[in-house]
Image (spheres, helix red, strand yellow):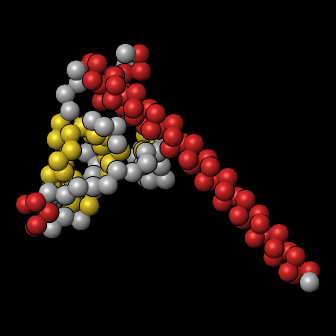
Amino acid sequence: MRDDGWARQRAEAVRVQAERLEARQDAEHARAEAMLRDFVAAARTAGLAPEDLLVQGYGGRSTARTGLKGWYLRVDRTLGISTDGDFYVLTAPIGLLDRVRGVRPDPRRPPLTLGAGGKDGESVPLADALDRVLPGWRTR
């Protein structure tokens, strides 16, 4: 009996923690999405020309068209934002047909920190990445 009660308590604690984590992540994504919307509005006001976004193959040797226009958020061009304010990871396995036909990546919910959990120096706050693309965008 005691073991069953303990197991139920642990399961409930795990469930509550998972709910809290999900709520915290949703709040961070919502803040990042709002930041991207504000950036796109500032970029349009500033006349910042979008460019064609390409998907890079793993290893960076090949690319494929996406049909998307926007801005790259990283110097290595692996993350981007479309003119609609959608966030994209721009790496994927690319085959010969993909290079000819192009690919259409799915938008993802943006993080507040790009590359979080990666190697040292690879994580960058989203706001800093946007400042690199359009300095002073928050004050426009």
Residue 121 picture location, percent across and down: 42, 44
Residue drawn 61% across the image and 47% down it: 24
Q: Is residue 123 visible?
A: no
> Total marks drawn?
0
Q: Is residue 29 visible in the rendered structure shown here? A: yes
- Residue 17's spot in the image, x, y percent? 70, 58
Q: Residue at x 27, y 55 (%)?
A: 105
Q: Is residue 5 left or right of residue 52?
A: right
Left or right: where does residue 106 sit relative to residue 34?
left
Image position, residue 87 (x, y; %): 35, 44
The residue at the far bottom in this view is 1
Q: Is residue 38 above or below residue 59?
A: above
- Outermost residue toward the right in this view: 2
Kindly indicate the quadrant of the structure image that contains residue 135: top left
* Quarter that holds the N terminus: bottom right
Q: Quadrant of residue 8?
A: bottom right
Instruction: Identify the residue at horizontal 26%, vertical 61% (top origin).
Output: 92
Residue 119 lies left or right of residue 67; in this view the side is right
Vertical position of residue 132 compared to residue 3: above or below: above
In what quadrant of the picture does the C terminus appear?
top left
In this rendering, the answer to whether 120 lies above or below 44 is: below
Residue 97 in the image: state x and y as whole percent.
Answer: 10, 66
